[in-house]
Amino acid sequence: MKELRKFNRDRNLGLLKNTKVFDVIIIGGGALGLGCALDASSRGFSVALFEKHDFCKGTSSRSTKLIHGGIRYLEKLHFSLVYESLKERDLLIKNASHIVKQIGFIIPVYKYWSMFYYWIGLKLYDLISGNYIFSKSKIIDSKTALDYIPNLNKNKLKGGVIYFDGQFNDSRLGIDLALTSLEFNSVMLNYMSVDNFLKENNKISGVKVFDSIGDKYYNIKAKSVINCTGVFSQSIINLDSIQQESLIKPSQGIHLIIDKKFLNGDFGFLVPNTSDGRVLFAIPWLNHVILGTTDREVENPVFDPVAKEEEVEYILKNAKQFFNIKPKRSDIKTVFVGLRPLVSNSKKLKSKDLSRKHKIVISESGLISVIGGKWTTYRKIAEDTIDFLISKFNLKTIESPTKKIKIINGLKHIDFSEKSLSEKFYISKSLIIHFVKNEMAINLDDIMSRRTRCLFLDVEESIKIAPIVVEIMANELLKDKIWENKQLKSFYKLTNLYKI
Ligand SMILES: Cc1cc2nc3c(=O)[nH]c(=O)nc-3n(C[C@H](O)[C@H](O)[C@H](O)COP(=O)(O)OP(=O)(O)OC[C@H]3O[C@@H](n4cnc5c(N)ncnc54)[C@H](O)[C@@H]3O)c2cc1C
């Protein structure tokens, strides 16, 4: 069996210093950055990727965890986006079957006429998807709906329409993408912030990058640079040349986690039209239930966004209408918040009406920025971006092979029979050591939030087990008690943002 390359910081730093000029530098280690790294490296380009915090620390760990066409985009008549997303959904379930799974949803129906309306919409969804990988939608009566979701509000329930989409663990797919592009020789480093550009004759020739672990600056040269910093893209564009108008309109979405008993099964539900015209999801995920989400424009993006009281109230109020036993505030185990990097073309449109399509732009000095899109379409966006790069820089045309690349499962050889440190979710000593040795986990938050999803599932339980986790990390990284205490202090501070 072929041994996978270790995702190791020192090794990657060594490769960084030994490479004179990279073909491509990628700024940002979220879905788009990691997707571009895999696309470019698998075409044979030399690639370096820099992530300011941890991989997927930004929006890419904070999604609703759906690999979907987006049925609500059908209502807005965004057929090409739905078509593209459904094609990518197929590719992902084929190429990353260890992490992308089919999940069933019920749209509960309380008025007969709406049954027909949703059924037509979902048949169109099936038709656009045109495949046999995902099961097809169908109408069900109220008894069947309650068999699937026993806690659905049965008062006046007429039945429902079932449909199927994909579900995944976003930050785990991010790590698996990094591991896959490592096999194509990408150099990838977290905790490396791009702070400026190097220029020759007014053209970008590299980046100045700050290593916040080693407390050191590096000047790294490259033939091309791609900005994949999501909601922070505008600040990178402005580092290159000040632009008056922002290309991005960040929109905040929150999720509440409650106990799995509220769905008590494998099916989720979707409400297409809440009190203010948004979509509401209740989704089983990792033995818990996700409720979400909101769509609120924000002016200035931050790395750790906070849920507003009215957002929590909005989700609880709307969710309560559809449950028999109703979730209360005290049932919320954690709240996590993400910022959508939406492309802004019009000041008049509200963020919930903005398209999830992506945009690729190039500045006069040659900085390529890619903005928008969804996790579902990361591969296609990456392919478009590298095609764009090839055409703008007159490089030799090489087709993207990513449609056929199997994504590596970083946890394939983990023995999950070892006793867990928690009864609420799986986290073991050997898993923690694996993350430190092979998946570039540096800080406690990396393990609690993105390698495992403890903090995204249960904040109190995460606080409880953090001292044990950090001690195992310290032993592995040869760190002292001062380091442990510093880690715990900053992690506990972070947990405040996940409490309500
Ligand atoms: C609430 C919500 C729900 C969503 N649900 C879904 C869903 O169910 N399905 C779906 O397909 N999509 C979903 N999305 C969309 C999807 O999550 C995003 O489109 C995607 O994660 C964006 O990835 P990105 O790489 O563009 O941005 P990010 O993930 O934010 O990555 C950008 C990275 O750049 C880094 N960075 C910033 N500045 C610098 C710098 N100077 N130097 C180096 N690095 C830097 C950041 O730390 C960050 O990690 C959702 C989004 C939100 C907000």
Image (tube, rainbow, N blue to C red):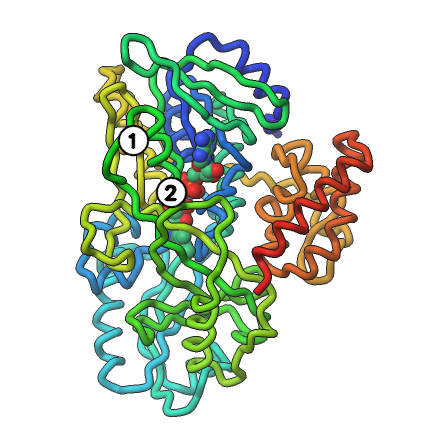
Position of 333 with respect to 239 (left or right) is: right
Above or below, comparing residue 152 to residue 31 in the picture: below
Question: Which three-letter amino acid code belongs to the residue tagged 2?
Answer: Val
- Crowding around mark 1 (Cα neighbors within 10 Å: few <14, some 14 to 19, many 20+) is many
Name the image quarter holding the C terminus. Answer: bottom right
Figure quadrant of residue 239: top left
User: Could one spot residue 376 in this view of the protein?
Assistant: no
Q: Nearer the viewer, residue 245 or 414?
A: 245
Name the image quarter holding the N terminus. Answer: top right
Q: Secondary structure at mark 1?
A: helix
The quarter of the image that holds ligand 1 is top left
Q: Earlier in the sequence, mark 2 or mark 1?
A: 2
Q: Which residue is mark 2?
A: 231
Percent position (x, y) of residue 252? 40, 55
Q: CA distance from mark 2 to mark 1?
A: 17 Å
Identify which residue is drawn at 49% across, 31% down: 51
Identify which residue is drawn at 32% across, 30% down: 237
Figure quadrant of residue 36: top left
Position of 457 with respect to 87 (left or right) is: right
Percent position (x, y) of residue 370? 31, 35
Question: Which three-letter amino acid code belongs to the residue tagged 1?
Answer: Thr
Determine if the C-beta at disc 2 is less than 8 A from ligand 1: yes
Percent position (x, y) of residue 128? 22, 57
Figure quadrant of residue 381: top left
Q: Secondary structure at mark 2?
A: helix
Percent position (x, y) of residue 64? 44, 57
Q: Which residue is mark 1?
A: 385
